[in-house]
Amino acid sequence: MKRILTALFAALILMFGTPLAANAATSNSRDYSTLAARWWTWALTQPASTSPLLDTTGAHCANQQSGNTWFLVGLFNTGGTVTRNCTIPTHTAVFFPLANAFDCELATDNVPAKTVRTATDYVQNGASNLSVTLDGISMASAIEFEHSDLFNLALGTDSIFGPDAAGYYYPCADSGYYALLNNLSPGTHTLQFTGTLSSQTINVTYYLAVQS
């Protein structure tokens, strides 16, 4: 397999309003670029059987999560609607894509970084319908476009791409619109983020239970 190229977006629909529960991040795109590379590594290296990308309930939302920033997902390379429940620790930020795409090349092919970066250039002007709301309040200021740091992927035979994709990939890079929400308060919150790319739109509802 010479190349993996896919697009993924996430959208969540807000159902009710409560007091403001988080702050939009004030970090710059450099932070988003680093987090985006981490997001892809986290999302793509998990076994297909427990992949958060394929999870339609939220049962696997805590898989391989650690630190003070957790990742949320949409649907894998398809449009549609899904609802998930996820319990996260207190004082934890959440980082998620509204519209993004990545490209990876086999390390043995020695492909230059410029190639993988160029492959996702279309995202910046091709994405639309970008919105984030938390408990009925717009978090539009949390949305930023980024080009990720370069990253690598070591895929096993049980990845979401199937056994034929097993191998070590480098370089990998993405372009995308992401949001980072800090300081979610203890309690239950509903989050919405939407995005459209390549004629696919995703709407995903997350009910977040933040532990006290």
Image (cartoon, grey):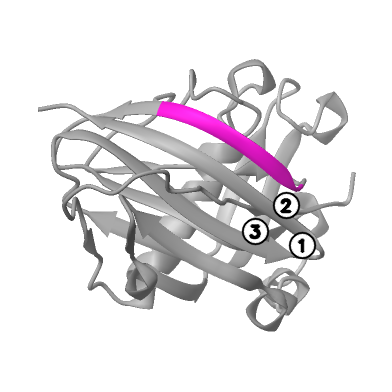
Q: Going 38% across and 52% down the picture, which residue do you hit?
A: 95
Q: Main secondary structure of the magenta part?
A: strand
Give the spatial CA distance, label 3 vs label 2: 10 Å
Q: Which mark is residue 172?
A: 3
Q: Is 81 contained in the magenta span?
A: yes
Question: Can you give x and y, in whole percent of width and height, for residue 165 in the image?
Answer: 82, 35
In the picture of the structure, the residue carrying the numbered disc 2 is 107
In the picture of the structure, the residue carrying the numbered disc 1 is 110
Depth order, front residue of 46/153: 46
In contact (CB < 8 Å): disc 1 and disc 2 = yes
SS for callout 1: loop
* Amino acid at circle 1: Asn
Q: Which mark is residue 185?
A: none
Give the spatial CA distance, label 1 vs label 2: 6 Å
Q: Would residue 193 be found to the left or right of residue 191 on screen?
A: right
Asked whether residue 135 is in view, the answer is yes
* Amino acid at circle 3: Cys
Check the picture and name the quadrant holding the N terminus: top right
Report the span colored magenta.
79-85
* Amino acid at circle 2: Ala
Relative to residue 205, is residue 157 depicted above or below?
above
Depth order, front residue of 84/71: 84
- Considering only order in the chain, which callout, 2 or 3, is on the residue closer to the N terminus? 2
